[in-house]
Image: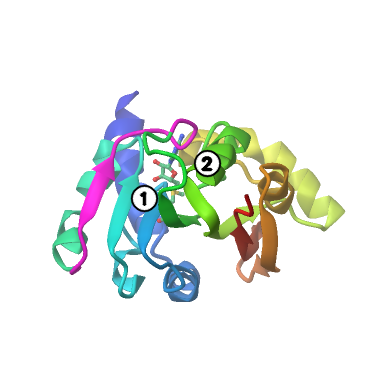
Amino acid sequence: MNPYQKYILPRLLNSTMRREETEKLRPGVVSQAVGRVLEVGFGSGLNLPHYRGILKLYALDPSLELYNLAETRIKEVSFPVEYIKASAENIPLSENTIDTVVSTWSMCSIPRPELALKEIFRVLKPGGKFIFIEHGKSPGRLTAKWQKWLTPIFGYVSGGCHLDREVDQLISQAGFKITELETFPQKRRPLLFMYKGVALAKK
Ligand SMILES: C[S@@+](CC[C@H](N)C(=O)[O-])C[C@H]1O[C@@H](n2cnc3c(N)ncnc32)[C@H](O)[C@@H]1O
């Protein structure tokens, strides 16, 4: 990990992930979580204020630097938060133990999203929910081309973020049944095309 990734990137993400347009979308997604919850790509804990009545949160993220920025937010919630320093491609939890998995703008940065989604499916109880808001490939051909060209540069400055992942396809390919899906471009950032929804782990 170079100094940019260790010292600058965590602070940059903590700040850019609090943009108004992003913050508006969090409550509607996160408040659907119930029971024992796993959040993949927990980051600096920006979703914490939006959980309602959950039993426990497993906060998984490989970046301890980002997790440390969540300290104050963790103190303000009434449910237990357990940090898991791990990658979503290899989740150190037993199968069929989690009621809800939450992911907000994390699939773009996980190096092997197809493995992460298989792991998410494995740890969810039968019928458990995967609740997500991600950005991914635009249906517009020109925008999708720009997303492809710009991903290497954008990924370098943003911690490996990919602009052009086919989020719904990746989720379905891992065995999930998508029951709700909304797709829309971000108003002021056309390269960020949103996928917001719920997928069930039917086993
Ligand atoms: C754009 S940030 C989003 C953070 C947070 N979910 C939010 O909504 O503010 C992407 C997150 O994915 C995390 N990440 C990167 N690689 C990962 C991996 N292999 N497994 C789990 N999380 C990962 C990063 O550390 C970072 O916290």
Helix, strand or loop status at disc 1: loop
Q: Nearer the viewer, residue 153 or 163?
A: 163
| Tag shown at residue 137 | none
Residue 92 on the magenta span = no
Q: Report the side of 43 relative to 22 (left or right).
A: left
Residue bearing mark 1: 42
Q: Where is residue 69 shown, x and y percent of the image? A: 22, 50
* Residues at marks 2 and 1 touching, judged by CB atoms closer than 8 Å: no
Residue depth check, mark 2 versus mark 1: number of the one nearer the observer: 2
Name the quadrant where ligand 1 sits: top left
* Within-10-Å neighbours for mark 2: few <14, some 14–19, many 20+: many
Q: Which residues fall within the magenta stretch?
A: 77-90
Residue bearing mark 2: 122
Q: Report the side of 103 relative to 36 (left or right).
A: right
Helix, strand or loop status at disc 2: helix
Is the distance from the Cβ of mark 1 to the nearest ligand 1 atom less than 8 Å? yes
Q: Where is residue 81 shown, x and y percent of the image? A: 23, 54
Residue 99: quadrant of the picture: bottom left
- Name the kind of residue labelled 1 in the image: Phe
- Name the kind of residue labelled 2 in the image: Arg
Q: Nearer the viewer, residue 187 or 120?
A: 120
Q: Residue shown at 46%/37% (left/top)?
A: 88
Q: Residue shown at 30%/64% (left/top)?
A: 48
